[in-house]
Amino acid sequence: MKQPNNPAYAMNHIDWDRKHNPSGDDEELLEDDSSRDNTETAETYSHPDVSTSAEWLAEALKSHQIEADFSLESLAALDRFLAASISAQLPGSRDFLSDDLSFRAFAIGAYVGEVIRREKGGEWTSDSSDPLVEINIALAFEDGSECFPMKRVFERLNNGPASSFTSFAVELGLTPPIAPGEPVESTPKSPEDFNVRGFVMLWNNPSPGLGEAEFHFAADTTACVNLLGYFTFLESRTIPSLKSISALTAEEGVVLPESHADGTTRAQMGIFYDPDMSPDYWRLVDDNNQLYIEMGRSRLLEFKNAVTTIFLGHDTPLIGGPDQLIQLWPKAKTEDPEDDESEPAQDSETPAE
């Protein structure tokens, strides 16, 4: 039984594999060079969608006159292509990445990983029970070290050329010919420098049992990528940080999910993170048309994982405590599809520290 390779299938490849091949008996699902025992207790396994997604990307790049031959040289070509294809303000909004960003980000990581695997050896490994396996899938080497090509794609989308794939290869001990490219961009130094772009919606639609304490948050793929970068940035902070992010409002044509169509939108989302707070600290403050989210480290990681979940198109997660929670939804959008081409709402910066 073989599932055809296409973008709609690719981001659900692990779920499909679990459903149709939980014990690994169907040999057609295994890569040609795989002889591992794919039982339920196996710690590593191989999945054809890594290689087929990498091949898909290679063919797609060739249509853009990029020689994607799985050589180390091709990583420099991929870097140059992405520099021309990614908007500095809106990762995923231009040309190649404007359609189905989730799949194409996975395919880029698959290609980069395959280039490294063919040069350095190693095998793809993952925890099949991990709901975020598409992001956390690793390339393990004989010396016990490993790398995470899919995570590198997120870094590249957020940091720009500073997180190039050629430098990724160098970090792993390889020596690709690094061609001159775009100037290296500086990494954000403060929350004000870290602009969160894309479309974000925030609304209150209370449940009978929770009163006013239930909120809903939706983001498109561009905003997800930016938020993941911002949360990663916050993880390294040793001092409190406060940032205000603009949201779409009802007047701007927000379409809420049909089951929550009576929600009341908020214009701003304030994120306050303090690494010295209790890790489980969580508090929502609804004030003056803005929802402030105060949180400690564990809640920050929970929020980050939830954004990753909706980026991948999985079930909408709930975050927070039993008395104050937020449900996340994927792909905020407006009534008119042409609005996607317009400029996004700009951040309203709030001084930090």
Image: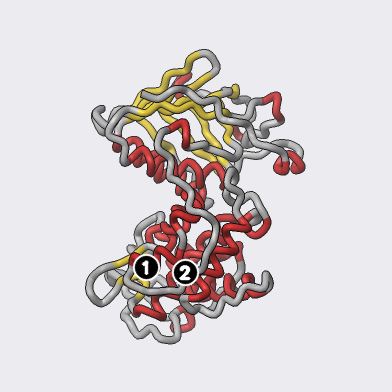
- Would you say 172 lies left or right of 211 here? left
2 and 1 marks in contact (CB < 8 Å): yes
Q: Is residue 198 visible?
A: yes
Q: Is residue 324 visible?
A: no
Disc on res. 143? none
Which element type, helix, strand or loop, lies under badge 2? loop
The percent coordinates of residue 282 (x first, y second) are 34, 27
Which residue is identified by label 2?
178
Characterize the local packing of mark 1: few (<14), some (14-19) or many (20 or more) Cα atoms within 10 angstroms: few
* Residue at 64% across, 75% down: 62
Classify residue 145 by image quadrant: bottom left
Depth check: give the residue in front, 193 or 93: 193
Q: How is the image coloured?
A: secondary structure
Query: Mark 2 to mark 1: distance in Å?
Result: 9 Å
Which residue is identified by label 1?
170
* Residue at 72% across, 43% down: 341
Tell which tag, 2 or 1, sits nearer the viewer.
Answer: 2
The percent coordinates of residue 49 (x first, y second) are 50, 72
